[in-house]
Image (tube, grey):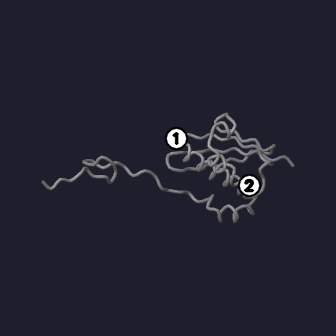
């Protein structure tokens, strides 16, 4: 049985990640580079492969990722969400373990906009009574 390409989208902060999943040997490429080369920190690498480890399919699928926007942590979490969504498209039984770890939930928190008359979103300049 030959599996066609499954694609999914994940978002986090300002990052958008598109994932293409095919039958393969467990190779993960992000923007054309191996994921360990793209994300150099170990805990960020773990975030990317976490959904695959959760459902124990690390070596069954090749994953091609296009990710843009935001910083490395946002990109890694967007990729984690996209991989989780693609796995659920393949097998509906993967939904409950991934949902329990909150890999399918969109984390909507993002940076609050800067307000006028303030140095940051909420920080105020030092107040002097006299």
Q: Nearer the viewer, residue 82 or 5?
A: 82
Locate residue 6 relative to residue 127 in the image: left or right.
Answer: right
Check disc 2: other Cα within 10 Å, few if <14, some if 14-19, many if 20+.
few
The residue located at (27%, 47%) in the rendering is 116
- Residue situated furthest left in the rendering: 130
Of all residues shown, which one is farthest toward the front? 130
Label 2 vs label 1, nearer the camera: 2
Within 10 angstroms of label 1, few (less than 14), some, or many (20 or more) residues? some
Mark linked to residue 130:
none
Residue under label 2: 53
Q: Secondary structure at mark 1?
A: loop
In the visual, does 117 lie left or right of 49?
left
Q: Residue at x 65, y 65 (%)?
A: 100
Q: Where is mark 1, residue-wise?
A: 69
In the structure shown, which secondary structural element does the residue marked by tag 2 occupy? helix
Q: How many labels sit on residues? A: 2
Q: Are marks 2 and 1 in contact (CB under 8 Å)?
A: no
Task: Report the residue at 46% width, 52% height from top.
Answer: 110
Q: How far apart are the alpha carbons under marks 2 and 1? A: 26 Å
Seen from the viewer's position, the closer of residues 60 and 126 is 126
Disc on the earlier residue, 2 or 1: 2
């Amino acid at each position: 049985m030959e599996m066609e390409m499954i694609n999914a989208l994940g978002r986090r902060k300002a990052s958008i990640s598109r994932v293409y999943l095919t039958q393969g040997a467990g190779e993960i490429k992000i923007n054309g580079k191996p994921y360990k080369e793209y994300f150099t920190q170990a805990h960020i690498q773990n975030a990317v492969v976490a959904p695959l480890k959760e459902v124990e399919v690390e070596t069954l699928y090749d994953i091609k990722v296009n990710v843009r926007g935001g910083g490395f942590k946002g990109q890694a979490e967007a990729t984690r969400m996209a991989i989780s969504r693609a796995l659920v498209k393949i097998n509906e039984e993967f939904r409950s373990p991934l949902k329990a770890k909150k890999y399918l939930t969109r984390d909507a928190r993002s940076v609050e906009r800067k307000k006028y008359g303030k140095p940051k979103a909420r920080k105020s300049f030092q107040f002097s009574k006299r």
